[in-house]
Amino acid sequence: MTIERPGVSIISIHGKSPKIADSAFIAPGCRIIGDVTIGEEASIWYNCVLRADVSAIHVGARSNIQDGSVVHCDGPDPRNPAGFPTYIGEDVLIGHMAMIHGCTIHDRGFVGLGAIVMNGCTIASDAMLAAGALLTPGKQMGRGELWGGRPAAKMRELSDMAIAEMQLGVAHYVQNGKNHAAATKD
């Protein structure tokens, strides 16, 4: 089953349908497919794809996934019977054109522009993956750490000010989502 909203595709597959909070902003051009849950005041920006056709994707309250990003997951296989669902906690910032795949991003995590997060990775609370970084399979970022590079490695601990600035970004995107929802309403 496919449900069309203006410029948005919401598609059920394998008996699983997206569950989207009424207060979430889903921008025109998005494709939300399968076992996807999107929380209150979250925002999924223009031309993002969230495809949960082989496992689940969860996006927590007030998190945002910025323009052109792709979120996917991996299903079970003999080496990993549980598969690799994608879990994005609350108050998470994901920059434009990021690739998020089969990983966990805890509350208040940050993924920079164009970064890639691969299967089995974990980004802890208040941690930041720098723009353009590649977090290779299974890497575990600790709380409050900054990682960067290709492949990504720990660079340093984040300051309290840097962590506070990330949360200002969350508040900005919650309000901006409301503004864009009003602007794109039919």
Image (cartoon, rainbow, N blue to C red):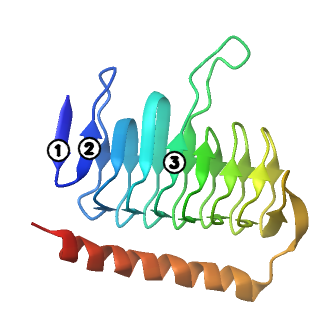
| Tag shown at residue 70 | 3
Give the Cα distance between marks 3 and 2. Answer: 14 Å
Residue at 30%, 44% in the rendered image:
19
**Figure disc tally:** 3
Q: Within the image, what quadrant is residue 125 found in?
A: bottom right
- Mark 2 residue type: Ser
Quarter of the image where the N terminus is located: top left
| Tag shown at residue 123 | none
Name the element at disc 1.
Answer: strand
Against 104, is 114 above or below?
below
Give the Cα distance between marks 1 and 2. Answer: 5 Å
Q: Position of residue 114 (x, y in %)?
A: 64, 60
Name the element at disc 2.
Answer: strand
Against 111, is 16 above or below?
above
Quarter of the image where the C terminus is located: bottom left
In the rendered image, the residue lying farthest to the left is 186
Residue hosting label 2? 9
Residue hosting label 1? 4
Seen in the image, is 61 located left or right of residue 95?
left
CA neighbours of label 2 inside 10 A, class few (<14), some (14 to 19), many (20+)? some
Marks 1 and 2 in Cβ contact (< 8 Å): yes
In the rendered image, the residue lying farthest to the top is 78
Q: Position of residue 33 (x, y in %)?
A: 35, 37
- Mark 3 residue type: Val
Against 92, is 164 above or below?
below
Residue at 79%, 43% in the rendered image:
136
